[in-house]
Amino acid sequence: MYEGKKVIVVMPAYKAALTLEKTYHEIPHDWVDEVILVDDHSPDNTVEVAKAVGIQHVIRHDKNLGYGGNQKTCYTKALELGGDIVIMLHPDYQYTPMLLKAMISIIGNGLYPVVFASRILGKGALKGGMPIYKYIANRLLTLFQNILIDQKLSEYHTGYRAFSKEALEAVKFTKCDDDFIFDNQMVLQLFWKGFEVGEVTCPTKYFDEASSINFKRSSIYGLGVLWYSVRYRLAKWGWKWDLMN
C-alpha cells in the first residue's frame, strides 16, 4: 500500500505476448499491491504469458469486446478488489512502468485525484517515434477540446492513466462506448464531476510490437472526439446527455 491506500495496476491486453513480460517486470511491485490483466480474446498466448510471469488476476474475454469494453472489465475488477488507486498500464511496453511511482504518489498524497502521463509535455512523442500525422492530429484535437471543455490539458489521448477510487466510482464508465472513444468519454465525465487532472511528462516508444490503430480508425476516433466535445459544451448549456446527468 501507499499511504494506507491499496494500489492496483490494470492491463488491458490484446496480442501482448511479446511485450508483456518486459512490461510486467518493470512494475515497481514494492508499491503495487495487485495486478489485473484482461485479455480481449487475443489470438496469441497472452494469457499463458500472463500466468507464467505471475500476474495475480488474469481474465480472458470469450469474445473481443473492444478497447473500451476491456477497460470496463479492468476497472470493475479493480473496484471489486478494493483498489484505492487504480492505474491503467498498457502491456505493449509503449509507456514506461517507471512512471508508476510518480503517478501513485501524486494521488496518494492528495495532490490530484486523476493523473495522466502525457506524451506531449516535453518531446517524448516525436522522439519516441509517434507518426507525424498522429502528432499533428493530437495537437489539433487537444486544442479544440481545451476550448470547448474549458480545460488546459496537454493531451487527452494518452493511454496511461491513474485514478483515485473516488474518481472511478463517480463516473459511469460502464455506460461508455466499447471502442477507443471510451477514454474521452471518461475524461468528459471527470471534468463534469469537478475532478482535476494532473499530468506528468512521459517518454513513449513506437515499434512494430506496440499496439496502434490505423489511419481509418484514427480518423473515426478523431471525429468521435470532436462530436463528444461538442456534446459536452451543449450539455453545459443545458442540453440533456445521459453520461453527464
Image: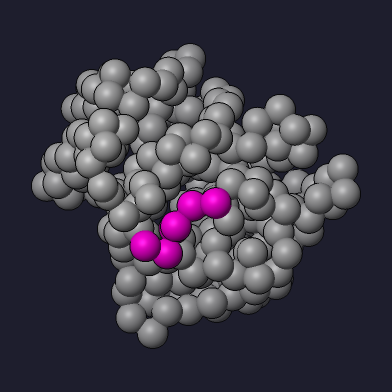
Q: Furthest residue to the front?
A: 238
Query: Which of the pair 215/235 is nearer the observer?
Result: 235
- In depth, the one of 86 and 113 nearer the eye is 113
Q: Position of residue 236 (x, y in %)?
A: 31, 33
Residue 197 location, quadrant? top right
Would you say the magenta stretch is mainly helix, strand or loop? helix
The residue shown at (38%, 50%) is 245
- Left/right placement of residue 132 relative to residue 216 reads right
Q: Is residue 96 visible?
A: no
Whether residue 221 is visible here, answered yes or no, is yes
In front: 137, or 225? 225
Does residue 231 appear left or right of residue 164 in this picture?
left
Which residue is outermost to the right?
A: 4
Say which residue appears at 44% left-offset and 57% top-offset. 172
**Residue 3 lies in quadrant:** top right
- Rendering coords of residue 81 (x, y %): 70, 69
Left or right for 163, reference 204: right
Which residues are drawn in magenta? 170-175
